[in-house]
Amino acid sequence: MSIKTWNEEERPREKLMQQGAAALSNTELLAILIGSGTRTQTAVDLAREIVAACGGSLASLSQQGCARLMQVDGVGPAKAASVLATFELARRLAAEIPEDEFTIRCSETAARMMSPLLRDLPHEECWVLYLNRAGRYIGKEKVSVGGLGSTIIDIKIIVKKAVERLASGLILVHNHPSGNPLPGEQDRVQTDALRKAAAVFDITLVDHIIIGRKKYFSFSDENY
């Protein structure tokens, strides 16, 4: 049956307009995103199949690439792109810092900013937050991408970019896809090397934060 034949209060779009987005199930919201079904499936049926293919987990769905989503019969490039774009917007929204928190005074603020971007990635990424002399956030940048177990940071590039931005402070942030945020020996070595290199240019390594699945580790908080 086409969704157009359903009672109006059961159709996802109409339901959203009448009751608000919070009233819809994950499947109904996804159905609105993909827009249409196939000759044999409604958009809701197709959305249900997509969610089932990811084990019913939105976190798992958010990590899928276009190729993986398009393995579901009825999902083409346009539908896959809509889903991926929505999750990316959600990650960026969650990572935005409120205007009154643009001064980063603690690890929690930095971790809250970066966790949505990093915690669900299947590989390691390393980012740098740049601060001015007052500790005010002036920008961030991804500096390297690694594999499942590690990423090598280019200390020269990080310091060079900090100098170009006239930054006085740095916060290094990377994730552990395993979900365990505790630092390994390589994390300690790279942190110390970056701290020393930055200090030559009167730039302070304020913190190194490792993002896990549900927790984070702060070198500063732990006096590392």
Image (cartoon, rainbow, N blue to C red):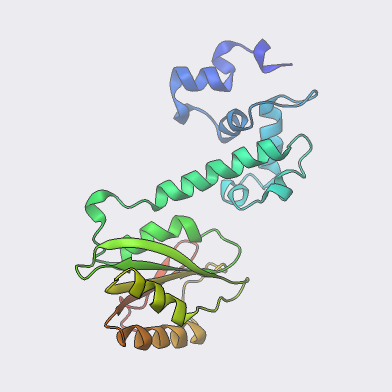
Residue sitting at x 42%, y 88%: 193
Look at the picture and state if 123 lies above or below 73.
below
| Quarter residue 33 falls in | top right
Look at the picture and state if 175 lies above or below 47.
below
Viewer-closest of 197 and 210: 197
Of the 4 image quadrants, the one containing the N terminus is top right
Look at the picture and state if 19 lies above or below 25.
above
Residue sitting at x 64%, y 32%: 34
| Quarter residue 134 falls in | bottom left
Tally of numbered tags: 0
Relative side of 210 to 207, left or right: right
Q: What x and y, as percent, mark residue 209?
A: 40, 71
Residue sitting at x 34%, y 83%: 198
Relative side of 188 to 151, left or right: left
Relative side of 9 to 68, left or right: left
Of the 4 image quadrants, the one containing the C terminus is bottom left
Q: What x and y, as percent, mark residue 204?
A: 29, 79
| Quarter residue 206 falls in | bottom left
Viewer-closest of 194 and 5: 194
Viewer-closest of 182 and 67: 67
Q: What x and y, as percent, mark residue 85?
A: 56, 43
Q: What x and y, as percent, mark residue 191?
A: 41, 83
- What is the residue that sits farthest to the left in this orientation? 134
Viewer-closest of 31 and 88: 88
Relative side of 212 to 217, left or right: right
- What is the residue that sits farthest to the front in this orientation? 164
